[in-house]
Amino acid sequence: MAAEAHTIDALGQFKLTTALGPLGASVNFTQSNLMMVISGLLILGLMVLGARPQAVVPGRLQALAEMAYEGIRKMCIDQIGNEGKAFFPFVFTLFMFVLIGNLLGLLPFSFTYTSHIAVTLTLALTVIVLVTVVALRIHGLHFFSYFFPPGAPVLLAPIIVPVEIISYLSRPVSLSIRLFANMVAGHVMFEVFASFILMMAASQALGSFGVIGAVGPMALNVALMGFELLVAFLQAYVFAILTCIYLHDAVHLH
Amino acid sequence: MRPIGLLTAAAMSVFTSVALAAEAKEGMPQLDFKNVLLKSQVVWLVIIFALLYVLLSRWALPKIGAVLEKRASTIEGDLNAARGAKASADAAVAELTAKTREAHAGAQAAIANAVDAAKAAAASQTAMLTARLDAQLAEAEGRINVARNAAMGALRQVAAETASVVVTRLTGVAANASAVDAAIGSALTARGLA
């Protein structure tokens, strides 16, 4: 991670290593997976400890847990309809897993598992497989009428059907790349500006002016941290709401 | 969604080009599909995510759901209790009003009864008094009549004696008793006193 003179290692932070010592190494358990476990424990801890007081007037932790629960539940019901209640645990897991992953990634020396396309694509494929299975189970073969909107001229079928199929298949791609790209871009920017700080401060040619000048990239990184906090929430929300919209399509077909 | 996508795509291209220029020989670790850790990461992801889903949906989320349900039922129960209390308070107020009205009416009736009784008592007392006075009056009138009759009875004798004395004095001769008596009888008859 450290910037040697004139080189910026912006991608080294995404490199996978094994975690938990020799035991982790023996099962190829990566530091990315360790962060997943930590975020899973945080989510479970929030919900279980938040539910423990069972207070009618909630305290702070309980209010947070209830806010998360009711917010996602409302989103499911608003987007999908009454059938959305059945998908609420899945959407909740997805949203919290992505959100806590994004937020944990912002801590120094941690790892952002949502910055790996393999992770985001796995999540997106899970969503798409679920959506397709739900659609097939509810509508049977009638599901395939989804690719030809009712009322469209039959003559245009050779154009409309491939377009619809491609747009359907591109959903997991756009879903996964959106999250992956946002996370990577943010973390690369952090790394680049942080390298600028070190390079300017250590520069022989600039001397003490370099130390003063290093305040610039430092300030940029501070502002970027606020922006990335927003992005962490926004991308988790986008991932969850798109899942809800796809599930709505699966349940209602158009 | 679209502007965000465009923005990120632009940012991506700028920054990955910076990064890739600096590290052209290695490329993005995320795209290094020969790395066995990349695949194991996905396997562990599936395990962790599935476990998290099961634990959340079976264990953690129902707890929060139960808390929310409990709160909703508590609030509903409290509202019902408040509604019940309000209804009983309304009933109590209605009962109070009715009781007050009843008591008022009772008091009025009692006053009217007392006034009537007092009037009746006064009337009976007046009647009794009047009767007694009437009786006394009647008795007095009786006595007067008796006295007058007695006086009237004595009148003939007094007149006869007086007439005899007067005749004797004037004439010096004793008066004829039967003539005097006849004259007195006619005189009394003429005056309506006989």
Image: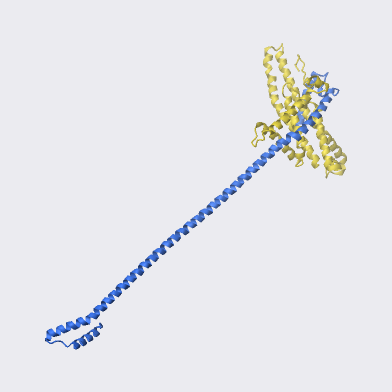
Chain colours: A yellow, B blue
How far across and down, in percent of the image, does residue B88 sit? 58, 48
Locate residue A54 relative to residue A111 in the image: left or right. Answer: left
How far across and down, in percent of the image, does residue A159 sit? 86, 39
In front: A71, or A198? A71
How far across and down, in percent of the image, does residue A215 sit? 67, 18
For the question of whether residue A71 can be seen, the reply is no
Q: Is residue A145 above or below residue B156?
A: above
For the question of whether residue B52 can be seen, the reply is yes
Locate residue A241 relative to residue B150 in the image: left or right. Answer: right
Q: Quadrant of residue B3?
A: top right
Q: Residue at x 79, y 29 (%)?
A: B48
Q: Residue at x 86, y 37 (%)?
A: A162
How far across and down, in percent of the image, does residue A178 sit? 78, 30
Looking at the rendered image, the quarter that the N terminus of chain A falls into is top right
Q: Quadrant of residue A98?
A: top right
In front: A88, or B140? B140
Q: Is residue B124 above or below residue B7?
A: below
Looking at the rendered image, the quarter that the C terminus of chain A falls into is top right
Q: Quadrant of residue B60?
A: top right
In front: B109, or A221? B109
Q: Residue at x 74, y 34 (%)?
A: B59
Q: Residue at x 87, y 44 (%)?
A: A154
| Count of marks placed on residues | 0
